[in-house]
Image (cartoon, rainbow, N blue to C red):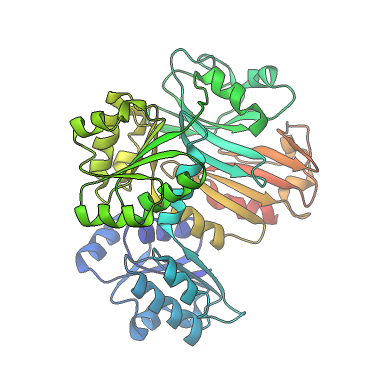
Amino acid sequence: MRVIVVGGGLVGSTLAARLASDGHDVVLVEQSRDLVAELNERIDVQVICGNGATVPVLEEAGITACDMLLATTDSDEVNMVVALVGSQIYRVPKVIARLRHPGHEVGFRQIAGADVERVAINPELAAVEKIMSLMPVPGAVDVVSFFADRLLIAGFVIRQASEFNGLLLSHLRLLFPATPVLVVALRRDGEWRVPHGDDEIRAGDLVYFAIDPAELDNVLALLGHRRGGERRVMIAGATRVGIELARRLESDGASVTLVEPGRERAEEAAGVLGDTMVIHGSATDRSLLEEEGADRVDGFVACADDHEANVVACLLARKLGAAHTFALVDNPALVSLIADLGIDAVISPRLLSVGLALHFARTGHVTKVAALLDDAVEAFEVEAPATSRLTRAPLAGAGLPRGILVAAVERGERILVPGGADRIEPGEKVLLVATSEMASRIDDILER
């Protein structure tokens, strides 16, 4: 496709680079000259300096022949204008807008006719949903569901005392003979791999498991984690993420405390939340956290606007005794250091936005895409067409390149971990896991 991305920040530049690596013709529009110079050094796409909300700049970028337009600036209003121009004037077939304020999504849905596919991406709402998915899985750094929540992909740092330490991957079938449990990705010494059966799990590895939800408690026990009872959660930051998260937790019956340093924000939060206790103070104040019982909470979530402060608050809460800590962080350098920081999970709105946009950009055979943790590995839920390489021969003879794993197959009411002798039937849902370098091969595998 011919793609235009407006906005060269973290989301826009990541999307532009990923779409270009998938073989699309990408033009990135950015207004800041300094950022344009940096982008020209960092990513291999055409970068135009200009205001992407104006018609002359969009025409210079090639909007008259554009197949997909992505508006990813930090301004909802600018993104709305870009989407309006692309939808109404140029009838771009696919339009994606990054919108933080829920009220803007209502207008966005009205700006294009039936001939334009459009999707609004709300990174803050995506962050709330990610945190909610993590909380029921203690110790997980990342959780994504596939096959209509019938299969979980969950990442864990392996402890020295874990029963998985020293286990060959091929032996997982002995531990879980009836239901699918599989290692789909592994990071060791900073290097990611899509593993094979002769690989060994070691302490310190970050391992992503595909887990049948019915086996989750058994997997957690082998990892050295267990699910607790009543949930007590402390949230740092009365941001949109913090307030929406508190609302969701309230409705689930959790006991919630929200800490906010700004008096005005704290008063606003107290006015819109029901049972949440709102405290005016700093989440990096040790005495305040001790007084409010941070040592007794099941979860501590730092989601202030200052992402470095979120890391500090989580480290302090963990030192005081919080069972699990979650930090909202969009700094790629910090995300990659999660295992060393001692924080249970880092939530990156940037990566969540990228994953949602990539899902929209893929072919019709891809029904869901998720970027795992620091964007080095992707998981794809696909529907296998009759013409694909997956369905023409048993998997051992399908010629799949190293770095792409067929992790699971939905076959009727069952979810299977296939072996080399298994054949995928046309129309079946398949979970593929690939390194970012191999992700561009997914469409080729499905089409041929």
State the quadrant of the C terminus: bottom right
| In this picture, residue 368 sits left or right of residue 98 | right
Asked whether the viewer can see residue 21, the reply is: yes
**Residue 407 point in image, percent of width and height:** 64, 37
158 or 396, nearer to the observer: 158
- The residue positioned 23% from the left and 68% from the top of the image is 32
**Residue 110 point in image, percent of width and height:** 52, 79
User: Residue 366 falls in which quadrant of the image?
Assistant: bottom right
- The residue positioned 50% from the left and 64% from the top of the image is 24
- The residue positioned 50% from the left and 56% from the top of the image is 356
| In this picture, residue 235 sits left or right of residue 138 | left
User: How many numbered marks are there?
Assistant: 0
Q: Is residue 116 above or below residue 391?
A: below
149 or 25, nearer to the observer: 149
Asked whether the viewer can see residue 212, the reply is: no
**Residue 118 point in image, percent of width and height:** 54, 71
Q: Is residue 228 above or below residue 430?
A: above
Q: Is residue 353 above or below residue 78?
A: above
60 or 311, nearer to the observer: 311
**Residue 137 point in image, percent of width and height:** 51, 32
